[in-house]
Image: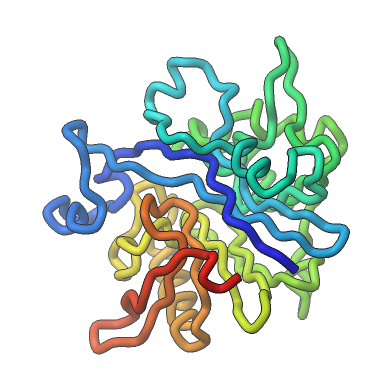
Amino acid sequence: MQIYNIHTGNFKLDGGAMFGVVPKSIWQKTNPADSNNVCNWAMRCLLIENGKQLMLIDNGIGNKQDEKFLSHYFLNGDESLSKSLNKIGFTESNITDMFLSHLHFDHCGGGVKKIGEEFELTFANANYWSNEDHWKWATQPNAREKASFLKENILPMQESGHLKFILEKEGQSSPFDFMEIFYASGHTDKMMIPKVKYKDHTICFMADLLPSVGHIPLPYVMGYDTRPLITLKEKEAFLNQAADNQYILFLEHDPVNECCTVKHTEKGVRLDRVFPLKEIL
């Protein structure tokens, strides 16, 4: 099995929204904001090559939204989904499985493209994996999250016949033998955190449970989370498990750091070290 970092570009979000109740005087030490109080964030995805299977986990924001929408998020950087795939010898048509941690636009927007006035799947040969509870949550959105669940990003998966649901079964959290799934419902309902078995490591794709190393202390919870107190419990449980087992945490949104490990300290779980994914390949 081989794994690859697929960088789809950067975008910007309000620093206060990203750190919730934590004062700017504290969070800006790790994530400095510009004059508009926004911080730069990555949209970093993970590609898994496993025999005949080529799975991509998340796919970034895409480029089909109109200029007004994209202007709110200050897309920047030279990377793109296509460029990153091409660099390692793949194209969108090679992807067999598109695993979606959740259906917010910055995680699934690249999975659908616009051709003229029609929407088509970017990965025409792939199954698109979500779960039934989260799908219902996304297609019948609450007022708080409605702006993050865009129907043009989501409905074409089902209309094309490529949508598949991962079922939670007792003793089995994933249909893939190289992956387990941790379900988290604090950020949004039933977000999936893949735990990938690679060589002697467990690599966890952290999605929005841990956006960056700046979010490791427990109170550092995003204002975007729908159930922040649940996030606190899920984050505490996961980070303790990560410290106990030396999980490698793959950071989707950290603008600088691709991976990190955490450790137990007198102040709770804290950052151990940061490193690029290629260090373990």
Residue at 21% x, 42% y: name it.
33
- List x then y, in percent, for residue 57: 65, 53
Tell me how the rendering is colored.
Answer: rainbow
Q: Residue furthest top?
A: 116
- Compared across the picture, whether 17 is left or right of 236 comes to left
Q: How many marks?
A: 0
Q: Is residue 15 above or below residue 178?
A: above
| Residue 85 visible in this rendered orientation of the protein | yes
Work out whether residue 98 or residue 201 is closer to the camera in this orientation and state it.
201
| Residue in view at x 52 percent, y 56 percent | 207
| Left or right of residue 13: residue 90 | right
At a point 47% along the width and 55% down the height, the residue shown is 208
Q: Which image quadrant is residue 26 in?
A: bottom left
Corner quadrant of residue 4: bottom right
Does residue 140 appear in this view?
Answer: no
Residue furthest out toward the left: 25
Image height of 49 relative to 249, above or below: above
In percent of width and height, residue 206 lies at: 51, 62
Q: Is residue 147 left or right of residue 203?
A: left
Rendered residue at 44%/51% (across/down): 253
Residue nearer the viewer, 228 or 91: 91
Percent position (x, y) of residue 201? Answer: 60, 80
Q: Quadrant for the C terminus, please.
A: bottom right
